[in-house]
Amino acid sequence: MNIVWIVVAIIIFTILPNFISGYYIRILTAIFMYAVLSQCINLMSGYMGYLPFGHVMFFGIGAYMTAILMRGNLPFIVAMLLASLSAIVVSIILGFPVLRLRGHYFAIATIGMNGALMTVVQNIDITGGARGTTFPIIMLPPGQVYSYFYYAFLALMIITTFAIYFIVNSRFGFAIRSIKANEDAANSMGINTTNTKVVTWAIAALFTSIAGGLYGYWMSFIAPDEVFDLMFITNSIIMMLIGGAGTILGPVIGAFIVETVSEFAWSGFMEYHLAVLGIITIIIVFFVPGGVIGTITEKIRDRKIAASIKSEVAANDR
């Protein structure tokens, strides 16, 4: 039944642009993008237990490297793939020393790396410096451009979600989970936790950088303080928590909830939208502490346990 619902949802979102305006297409595109970012944070934090607040650095790398390579007359797809490769290389180089840190030390270190990388981008000519840089203009009608990025981010969200599903349910995925459960015990059992953490971060960097490249081309102009903004990751963390950390569909559900509530708060309470958004988020977290998917899963499990106990009692009474 889960597979059926997922297939139905994919079909609906595939044909939906034919029935909605460009405004709603743009909102859904942003939701798909945030779902990808939240999935990557979920892989690192929800499953492995490492919260990379500075993970947005890979989003910025993807955006800037794609722009630079496209200015060198490379096609968008080729430039984006090469940009994601550069993000993987950076994640591996930084991962071996930084992923030896744990807890808030790791989170703070990633924030520092993001700030350092943003400073470099702001002070070199090839990136346009603090003024930012532009992408080649897409010579298509606005409606086609909106649809192009809508389907691109939809496809990326689907691919990312399925990739993480297969990863966390593989043998490598059990190594990832063991690090969150007890890293020292995982080490003692022969799991190379350092390599596991670095590879996991590289996977998260891959999808995050692709999202950054798509975002930059979508916006057509990027600046360092925009694509290296920590709010991208802060929002993604909130989405993960509301949807359900350590679940496959949690980040996707969280992205839909947070972006919809944010849009409602912005349109209805323009001057106080951040306060309204914060209050609504607190209410959701208070009543659904395990996230939407986590809470639903827990209730289903409790009902199964209760039904099992009831059937055992009835069998004993006979």
Image (cartoon, helix red, strand yellow):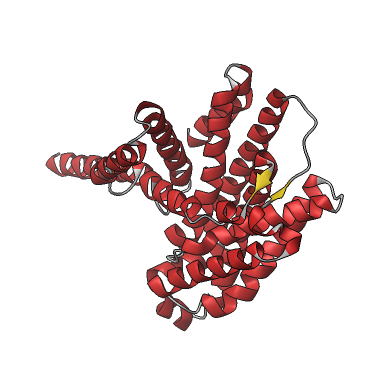
Left or right: 299 as drawn, with respect to 157: left
- Pick whichever, 317 or 33, lies toward us: 33
Report how many numbered discs are placed on residues in the image.
0
Q: Residue furthest front?
A: 131
The answer to whether 285 is drawn above or below residue 1 in the figure is: below
Q: Residue furthest right?
A: 73
Residue 288 coordinates in the image, percent (x, y)? 28, 43
- Pick whichever, 220 or 159, lies toward us: 220
- Pick whichever, 179 or 240, lies toward us: 240
Left or right: 137 as drawn, with respect to 31: right
Q: Residue furthest bottom?
A: 188
The answer to whether 217 is drawn above or below residue 95 in the figure is: above
The answer to whether 188 is drawn above or below residue 164 in the figure is: below
Residue 270, quarter of picture: top left
- Pick whichever, 110 or 180, lies toward us: 110
Left or right: 65 as drawn, with respect to 206: right
Does the image show residue 124? yes
Does the image show residue 206? no
Residue at (52, 55) in percent of width and height: 229
Residue 169 coordinates in the image, percent (x, y)? 53, 56
Residue at (43, 45) in percent of width and height: 250
Residue at (59, 66) in percent of width and height: 119
Left or right: 208 as drawn, with respect to 148: left
Residue at (63, 58) in percent of width and height: 130
Residue 90 coordinates in the image, percent (x, y)? 66, 69
Quarter containing the C terminus: top left
The answer to whether 105 is drawn above or below residue 230 in the figure is: below
Q: Residue furthest top?
A: 19
Residue 46 coordinates in the image, percent (x, y)? 43, 58
